[in-house]
Image (cartoon, coloured by chain):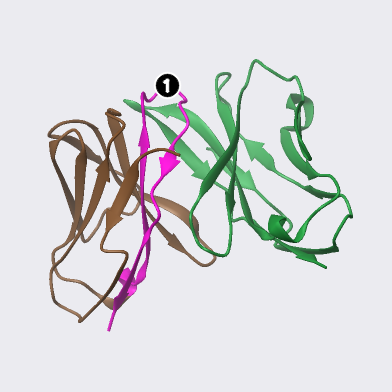
Amino acid sequence: DAGITQSPRHKVTETGTPVTLRCHQTENHRYMYWYRQDPGHGLRLIHYSYGVKDTDKGEVSDGYSVSRSKTEDFLLTLESATSSQTSVYFCAISRTSGGDTQYFGPGTRLTVL
Amino acid sequence: AQKVTQAQTEISVVEKEDVTLDCVYETRDTTYYLFWYKQPPSGELVFLIRRNSFDEQNEISGRYSWNFQKSTSSFNFTITASQVVDSAVYFCALSVRLYNFNKFYFGSGTKLNVKP
């Protein structure tokens, strides 16, 4: 199994509060991704990173920001959480971008009340 | 546009039955990759298989087999002699080049219930 951890694994927060989710990998993979999984929508890409300090938006990036200051860590921040951001968040990594397999972390279940 | 369709929302079988999960994809790219992932009730996403568009050879891994047919844009997954532990949601995904990375397009998943 790829060495990917996510923290926290579960979080309940209130609308309007900032939230940061962390993804940590021990594989030294260059590419990292944040997805959200919602019923009826499958997995949707929020942001991705193609190197330290190199990030770009995915298809559902509004309301989210990311940072990657080290190869092993990729942070996802909800600046002001809303109930529509209640979801399961998955981090994924891949060695390259050329069709490589993406390996997923265990997920973080976030509830915004 | 890229798209993955898993028309079977939920399938229920009795243990030891064979079951096929359908996956149909759409892309105009000639180079692409296809994947299957398993999501058991515990929630993690487990990689099962990767195929590139130039390799139509079918693959078998134990009770699992995959049938890739470019002519019908399908990448179907068959579980032989299903077991209760196969109960999970299975996702098919398509990966194609987009700007500086390969973007994944996931199907909506097929929930497989294997009853004892």
- What x and y, as percent, mark residue A19? 17, 66
Q: What secondary structure is marked by label 1?
A: loop
Question: Can residue B90 be seen?
Answer: yes
- Chain of the residue that carries numbered disc 1 in the rendered image: A
How packed mark 1 is, by other alpha carbons closer than 10 Å (few <14, some 14-19, many 20 or more), is some
Residue under the point 25% across and 45% down: A24
* Rendering quarter of residue A28: top left
Question: Can residue B27 be seen?
Answer: no
- What x and y, as percent, mark residue A70? 13, 36
**Quarter of the image where the C terminus of chain A is located:** bottom left
Q: Nearer the viewer, residue B77 or A47?
A: B77
* Rendering quarter of residue B23: top right
Residue under the point 75% across and 19% down: B57
Q: Does residue A76 show up magenta in the picture?
A: no
Q: The green chain is which one?
A: B
Looking at the image, residue A8 lies above or below residue B78: below
**Quarter of the image where the N terminus of chain A is located:** top left
Q: Does B36 sit left or right of A24 as displayed? A: right
- What x and y, as percent, mark residue A11? 27, 72
Q: Mark 1 points at which residue?
A: A98
Q: How many marks?
A: 1
| Amino acid type, residue under disc 1 in the picture | Gly
Looking at the image, residue A82 lies above or below residue A89: below
**Residue range corresponding to the magenta coloring:** A84-113
Q: Residue furthest right?
A: B17
Looking at the image, residue A108 lies above or below residue B30: below
Q: Does B26 sit left or right of A58 as displayed? A: right
Chain A color in figure:
brown
Q: Residue furthest top?
A: B54
Q: Does residue A102 show up magenta in the picture?
A: yes
- What x and y, as percent, mark residue B29? 55, 23
